[in-house]
Image: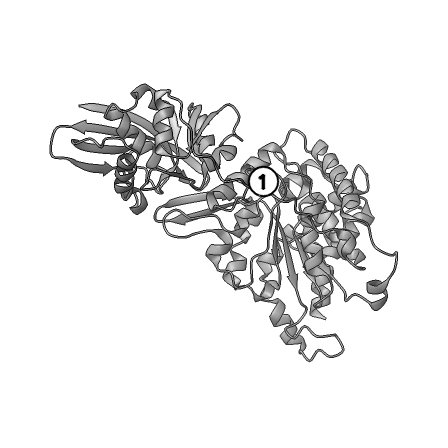
């Protein structure tokens, strides 16, 4: 009897569990048994692995073969176990040294001809392995750059099972060269200088970028709402190394990594269509849920154009991540938890017909009913409600009257974020939009004469308790942008206007 072990990883969301892959050869009728709560793709790996081994010129054992995946209680899904299963079989049959397989993480799908194919989720699986003490990994050649992002790990890349055999034996092996790949083209981000007029809208996206505040843009078609939202990512600072690994892990699990770009180091931008389902927005699918647009926008911007046209259930599903910065999607196959701390930008027309104010035939109740598709609990979680007026001919055709570029505004945003980070040093927060309202009001209180206007709005019902906290948050971000130590009454008043102004205008 011969037993060999290899290692793989089972992913649930972006959280992984190291799986021990055991191969046991015993006397008896030839056959293969796979145990350990395997899904359909994994059960089919028995035939894939056998064909790959034989077609790579290696013998398949003529004994009873038992393949066990431990821990047995953990569901395992996906074809990325193929390489570990093949290595365990080859080690059990003596084709490769068992000690060369032990202690290695092996990830990859096998083709019937023995070719090793790329798989999703390499980065979070390698991170899991390193945390468990496995520092040697074997991955498909296409995933080598992604796996190498993890510090302290030795990465071996193979293109075929024959290459893996040579690697484990310590023999030289010349892999077939990869086809030449064109370097990814640098994609220029849209510049804020292209936006005509809209002084208020430009200031709103600057504040949203500086403090991580959610934003509703309310205005007629052609006023520049989409242009403003698309330029918000260009105002955000580059992701830190830790943030980039977080974002890349989500994109890797979703299979959404840009070709030739193993690390996502810029704030992502997601703009799902208004016909998107709840699954497409927050994640789901059969088995363990896949990430949706909300998680793919982690550390970036989620833009919902024509927001009232989205299904109400899709919009209300965003209420959880807006508060917690994470999404827990429960399915029969398990609970997948994905990070989802994004800046939400909603854009809406003031009425169903979306015509000029002079030619609009919508009755006031129709206008209210249209905007009521954005539920009160959702809007209460959106910090700024900003009216974006129609662009005038003079603003559109003005020469030399362009506003500031994204680079200039981004520099101010970076300075404001640095001030906020110094204030929140020693806490889990780095921008004001992340600070819970209770903590902000208790640890950084403002004088009553400064917040008098917001308190009056709270007394008369124009603000909820959550809305009051958001007004104070906005005031702190404005103070950071103006280089002040704390907000004054004028900044609180400006923040209050952004909170209630668009709502009053829509009701008119």
Q: Nearer the viewer, residue 418 or 104?
A: 104
Q: Tell me the quarter of the picture where residue 75 sits.
A: top left
Quadrant position of the N terminus in the picture: top left
* Residue 448 visible within the image: no
Query: Left or right of 497: which side holds 88?
Result: left
On-image quarter of the C terminus:
bottom right
> Element type at marker 1?
loop
On the picture, is 156 further left or further right than 237?
Answer: left
Q: Name the spot of residue 324 as percent of width and height, x first.
A: 55, 44
Q: Is residue 352 above or below residue 275?
A: below
Seen at 72% across and 44% down, the residue is 210
Residue 501 is left or right of residue 261, and the answer is right
For the point 88% across and 56% down, the residue is: 400
Rendering coords of residue 490 (x, y %):
82, 49
Residue 155 visible to the viewer: yes
| 76 displayed left or right of 27 | right
Report the residue marked by disc 1: 264
Vertical placement of 381 versus 108: above or below?
below
């Amino acid at each position: 009897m011969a037993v060999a072990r290899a290692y793989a990883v089972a992913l649930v969301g972006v959280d992984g569990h190291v799986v021990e892959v055991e191969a046991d050869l015993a006397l008896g009728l030839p056959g293969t048994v796979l145990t350990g709560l395997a899904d359909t793709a994994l059960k089919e790996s028995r035939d894939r692995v056998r064909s790959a081994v034989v077609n790579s010129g290696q013998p398949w054992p003529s004994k009873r073969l038992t393949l066990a995946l431990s821990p047995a209680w953990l569901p395992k899904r996906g074809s990325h176990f193929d390489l570990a299963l093949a290595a365990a079989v080859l080690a059990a049959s003596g084709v490769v040294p068992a000690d060369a397989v032990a202690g290695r993480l092996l990830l990859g799908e096998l083709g019937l001809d023995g070719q090793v194919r790329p798989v999703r989720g390499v980065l979070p699986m390698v991170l899991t392995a390193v945390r468990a003490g496995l520092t040697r990994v074997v991955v498909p050649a296409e995933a080598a750059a992604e796996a190498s992002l993890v510090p302290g790990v030795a990465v071996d890349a193979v293109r075929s099972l024959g290459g893996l055999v040579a690697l484990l034996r310590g023999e030289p092996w010349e892999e077939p060269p990869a086809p030449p790949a064109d370097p990814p083209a640098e994609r220029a981000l849209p510049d804020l200088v292209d936006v005509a007029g809209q002084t208020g809208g430009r200031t709103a996206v600057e504040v949203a970028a500086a403090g991580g505040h959610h934003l509703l843009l309310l205005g007629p078609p052609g006023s520049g709402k989409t242009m403003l939202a698309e330029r918000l990512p260009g105002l955000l600072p580059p992701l830190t190394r830790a943030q980039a690994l977080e974002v890349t892990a989500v994109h890797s699990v979703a299979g959404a990594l840009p070709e030739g770009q193993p690390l996502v180091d810029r704030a992502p931008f997601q703009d799902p269509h208004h016909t998107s389902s709840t699954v497409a927005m927050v994640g789901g699918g059969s088995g363990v849920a896949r990430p949706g647009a909300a998680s793919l926008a982690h550390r970036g911007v989620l833009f919902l154009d024509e927001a009232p046209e989205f299904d109400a259930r899709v919009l209300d599903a965003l209420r959880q991540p807006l508060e917690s910065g994470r999404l827990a999607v429960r399915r029969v196959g398990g609970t997948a938890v994905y990070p989802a701390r994004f800046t939400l930008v909603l854009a809406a027309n003031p009425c169903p017909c979306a015509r000029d104010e002079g030619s609009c035939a919508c009755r006031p109740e129709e206008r209210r009913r249209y905007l009521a598709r954005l539920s009160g609990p959702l809007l209460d979680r959106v910090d700024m409600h900003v009216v974006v007026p129609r662009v005038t001919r003079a603003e559109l055709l003005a020469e030399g009257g362009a506003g500031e570029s994204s680079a200039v505004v981004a520099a101010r945003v970076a300075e404001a974020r640095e001030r906020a980070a110094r204030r929140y040093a020693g806490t889990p927060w780095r921008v004001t939009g992340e600070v819970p309202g209770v903590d902000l009001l208790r640890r950084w209180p403002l004088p009553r004469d400064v917040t008098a206007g917001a308190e009056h709005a709270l007394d008369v019902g124009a603000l909820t308790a959550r809305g009051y906290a958001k007004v104070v948050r906005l005031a702190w971000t404005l103070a950071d942008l103006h280089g002040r130590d704390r907000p004054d009454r004028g900044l609180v008043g400006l923040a209050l206007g952004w909170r209630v102004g668009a709502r009053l205008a829509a009701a008119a």
